[in-house]
Image: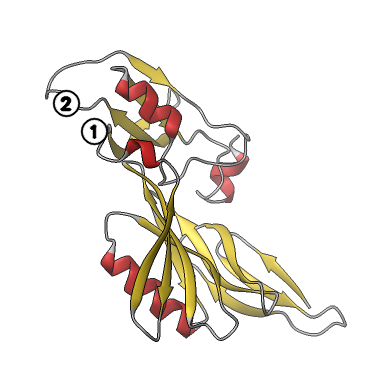
Amino acid sequence: AALILSDRKLIRKPLAGGPEQVVAEAPGPVWGTVRDRHLNTAVALVSMNERSAYSWFAPELAAVHGTLSRAFKDRDVALHAWSRDRTRFVARLSSPGAPGEWWLFDKARKELSPLGEEYPELKGATLGTTTWITYKASDGMEIPAYFTLPPGTRPGSKPPLVVMPHGGPSIRDVYDFDYMAQFLASRGYAVLQPQFRGSTGFGAEFRKAG
């Protein structure tokens, strides 16, 4: 069978014919899937607005992801790999204000062990503050964006602005550490990362508008 992603659903289509089956449905437009490398199949849908939202159809994995997400509420938790018996998990934690960290979670022992940091030299550094905003384009369309202010910005002040569109064009920025945005913020610039029309993860109409 083939697994087909629609705007919000994962559909199983038998190659020999027969009815299609909805395997899972996400609360918002789908950004991607999580795959089990041992079973070679999808185990979750990922939708995304400001942050990632997971629609798991593997209860064991959903429970582990929920446990880690509650422990690290301010960061995005991504399960990148796990043992075949689903007792040990490699997770990546990150946010716009926290560089990525990799951890090993042993479910049986209930132990969380650090594996490594992506930017250890930034430990203790004061970083910019990132918020999720929307603004109206010239034709009135609402455009979401990440907006980062330099560290220590006072209310009412207006630092110089750098507009930093993502590449693609049909991808998007995510709730993650962006070294370029934080570098510019450390030099006193505010940074706007627009999810311009055509960006993925906001529905088919928004994508087609690009």
Q: Position of residue 26 (x, y in %)?
A: 49, 67
Give the position of the N terminus as an image quadrant: bottom right
Q: Position of residue 4 (x, y in %)?
A: 70, 67
User: Given this view, does label 1 or label 2 mark the residue nearer the observer?
Assistant: 1
Q: Look at the picture and state if 158 lies above or below 197.
A: above
Q: In this view, does 128 lie to the left or right of 195?
A: left
Q: Could you give the CA–CA distance between mark 1 and mark 2, rounded to whole angstroms?
A: 9 Å
Q: In this view, does 59 lie to the left or right of 185?
A: right
- The image quadrant of residue 109 is bottom left
- The image quadrant of residue 119 is top left
**45 and 14: which one is in front?**
45
Helix, strand or loop under label 2: loop
**114 and 86: which one is in front?**
114
Q: Where is residue 59 in the image (x, y as percent from the top left)?
A: 46, 84
Q: In this view, does 35 lie to the left or right of 50?
A: right
Which residue is pictured at 46% across the width and 24% down the height? Answer: 164
Taking the image as drawn, is residue 112 in sight? Answer: yes
Helix, strand or loop under label 1: loop
Q: Where is residue 56 in the image (x, y as percent from the top left)?
A: 49, 75
Q: 10 Å neighbourhood of mark 2: few (<14), some, or many (≥20)?
A: few
Scheme of colours in the image: secondary structure
Which residue is pictured at 32% across the width and 24% down the height? Answer: 185
- Which mark is first along the chain, 2 or 1? 1
Which circle marks residue 45 in the picture?
Answer: none
Q: 10 Å neighbourhood of mark 1: few (<14), some, or many (≥20)?
A: few
Which residue is pictured at 56% across the width and 78% down the height? Answer: 83
Q: Mark 2 points at which residue?
A: 152
Contact (Cβ within 8 Å) of mark 1 with mark 2: yes
Which residue is pictured at 37% across the width and 67% down the height? Answer: 113
Q: Name the residue under label 1.
A: 126
Taking the image as drawn, is residue 141 in sight? Answer: no
Give the position of the C terminus as an image quadrant: top right
